[in-house]
Amino acid sequence: MTGEQALAFGLVGAVVALLVWDRMRYDVVALLALVAGVAIGLIPADEAFLGFADDIVIIIGSALVVSAGIARSGVVDALVRPVAGTLTTPTRQIAFLAGAVGVLSALMKNIGALAIFLPVAAQLARRHRTSSHQVLMPMAFASLLGGLMTLIGTSPNIIVSRVREEITGRPFAMFDYLPVGAGLMLAGWAFLLVGWRLLPKTRQGTRPAEESFAVEDYISEVVLPPGSSFVGRTVAELEALAEGEAEVVSLIRERFRRYVPANDWALQDGDIVVLKGDAPALQRIIRGAGLLPVGAPAEARSADLPVHEAVVLADSPLVGQTARRAELGRRRGINLLAVSRRGAEIVRRIQHLVFREGDLLLFQRSPGADHDVAAEAGLLPLAERNLQIGRRRPAWLPVAILAAAMLVLALQLAPVAVTFLAAALAMVASGVLKPDEAERAIEWPILILVGALISVSGTLQATGGTDLVAGWLAGASRSLPPVLCITLIMAAAMAVTPFLNNAATVLVMAPIGAGLARELGLNPDPFLMAVAVGAGSDFLTPVGHQCNTLVMAPGGYRFVDYPRVGAPLSLLILTLGTWLIVVVWPLSG
């Protein structure tokens, strides 16, 4: 071992130790390692930031934007609604979500399949008061397992197929991976149904804005327009859209008469519906029935405006005023949507309610209004809501964008990074997401972590450290029985993947596996399959595969959380994978 190789191993080891120590944020650790690598001469200064231009950085960032577009489209509710009532526990949620992600990952890129179902997991966790961190990691692992089943499921399978073509003249076909991959997927899925309990109970990930501040239920007034499909339908049918999380507290007809309706009352066009519930439940009713905010100008009703939340301060000019008297819409550019008052029941019309200190307002800024309207009105802004009241974005559009991206990837018409970036840009250009919404969807610390560690882990390859490990491995394998050689090759691929990437792992390990098979006079296919399975089965770190990285921030995971579930799952894959490979792909031949 040379001095440079020793430094490279030491640098990577220090990164792992600091991440396990968990006293510094992971992006800070990665940047410190990058600077240290430059300082000791392992990373050329002019190449220090090449990792931030890597495809993986673009893929992760773009996938987060695409996922946000799917979440904002309303299609998530449509996916969850038929089964949401039964998915009340983490085990049931994992059974449904991990299974769906795993199957879909066999037909498309696994990170795309995971991105589709991330919003679904968040919806279920919020609805049933469970913790999403118990579900997200099993979903990520299931996406890796599902990718093992077909040629297009994951990059290692494609590269191994090419290596086989170079060696034998015949590549692996689309479903050559299925017998081994399907067995591992089923076994891994069954393990995850119980293995999630190994995760800590105290993790808290990033949350949507509407869940970041606990408030009393809102009271909102909306009008049922003549063109709504709910004209003539009952109050019970309207409330069913919220699935028990919001209710119709009254109907206002004939300009001022207030009625407390029974469930079987028929709704009429022009009814003012007074709703009570939390923001996501209000969103489902308003969007599902095509309701419109009362008193909003026409341009605000048809516009796609963000919703803001703010507290009325003690010195606010609104204190002691009503919305009508203060002329919020005309004078201040504030379109009031709903009001929440902690510890008190709101019984007056919203426009006639006298504001108090501490009232929580949900409002839109009128088109053309100043950005500091909240400050001018003496309001303390809290968090921007994902609730959209007004023109509904077409649900089919983000789904069509994602489907087009998956088709491009399946036909291999463009690289993964370019395809995902194009899909993310399409979400913004088509109006599904506003630019600032897309920017907030990206977990920037995760991108910093990945970009910096790509350069740091590259020092192992640049100094010949990976070749050194490969030589040791080849020497040790010659004295083992053939079946154990398969296990060793697979284990080595699993161990190397976190510090390279899965594609680089295949490029390093596939020739070693094929060469070892040649020396032993055995069929190279099982050895190549072992490399593919090992390189696609990184369950031990958050940085070896973009699917693991994608759930790190939403799940609030730490580096040490991944081996809790990943280590026993890796042992399962090693033992069962070796047996399946030997059975399906004979060693001699």
Image (cartoon, rainbow, N blue to C red):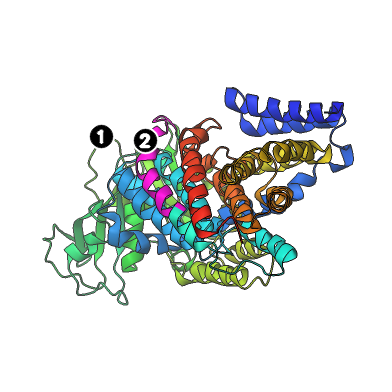
Say if residue 282 shows up in the picture: yes
Query: What quarter of the picture does the N terminus occupy?
Result: top right
Q: Is residue 175 above or below residue 48?
A: below
Q: Nearer the viewer, residue 539 or 210?
A: 539
Q: Are marks 1 and 2 in contact (CB under 8 Å)?
A: no
Which residue in the protein does label 2 denote? 197
Q: Secondary structure at mark 2?
A: helix
x 44%, y 45%: residue: 138
In the picture, measured across the screen, residue 424 lies left or right of residue 314, that is right
At a point 85% along the width and 42% down the height, the residue shown is 47
Instruction: Answer whether residue 201 is magenta in the image.
Output: yes
Helix, strand or loop for the magenta stretch, by majority: helix
From where the camera sits, is residue 208 visible?
Answer: no
**Taking 460 as reference, is 223 above or below it?**
below
Left or right of 182 on screen, residue 291: left
Task: Return the residue nearer the eye: 79 or 73.
Answer: 79
Identify the residue shown where x is 68% and y is 59%.
Answer: 159
* Three-letter amino acid code of the residue under disc 1: Gly
Residue 493 rendering spot, x and y as whole percentages:
64, 44
For label 1, count other residues whose C-alpha is less than 10 Å away and answer few (under 14), some (14-19) or many (20+): few
Give the magenta-colored segment's residue range. Answer: 184-203
Q: Looking at the rendered structure, which numbered label has been put on residue 343? A: 1
**At which x and y percent is residue 455?**
77, 40
Pinpoint residue 240: horizontal percent, then vertical percent: 23, 61
